[in-house]
Amino acid sequence: MGALAIQVDERVRDVRFTEDTISVDLMDGRSIAVPLVWYPRLLNASPEQLAQWEICGGGYGIHWEALDEDLSTEGMLRGAPAPEARAS
């Protein structure tokens, strides 16, 4: 590998919210932004609940204990909404 080889690292660095989106910053510098309507538990959560996330799954997941919600960077990159969002 040369000095300019790109290192892909899909582990979570940070999580941010707007009124309509969740954005996840990855360790390799990329950011994923997806609509909150894809994740009804997050959409209906309070700002305090949203702020209580923790990294899980070896760095590739995000967990909200109080909301019983888990997301993976793989699913977000693939564009996979929560099953209950697809049913609506």
Image (cartoon, rainbow, N blue to C red):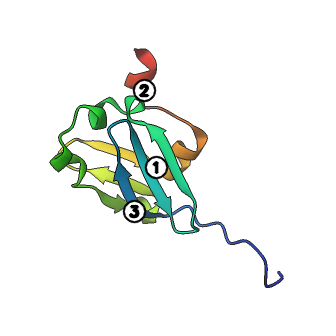
**Residue found at the far top of this picture:** 88
Instruction: Give the alpha-carbon distance from disc 3 to disc 2, as whole Å.
Output: 24 Å
Tell which tag, 3 or 1, sits nearer the viewer: 3
Per the image, label 1 sits on a secondary structure element best described as: strand
Q: Earlier in the sequence, mark 3 or mark 2?
A: 3
Instruction: Give the alpha-carbon distance from disc 1 to disc 2, as whole Å.
Output: 14 Å
Q: Which mark is residue 72?
A: 1
Q: Depth check: 43 or 76 in front?
A: 43
In the picture, measured across the screen, residue 11 lies left or right of residue 48, that is: right
* Quarter of the figure with the C terminus: top left
Spot occupied by residue 25 in the image (x, y as percentages of width and height): 47, 60
Per the image, label 3 sits on a secondary structure element best described as: strand
Residue named by callout 3 = 14
- Residue 82: which quarter of the image? top left
Spot occupied by residue 50 in the image (x, y as percentages of width and height): 24, 48
In the picture, measured across the screen, residue 68 lies left or right of residue 10, that is: left
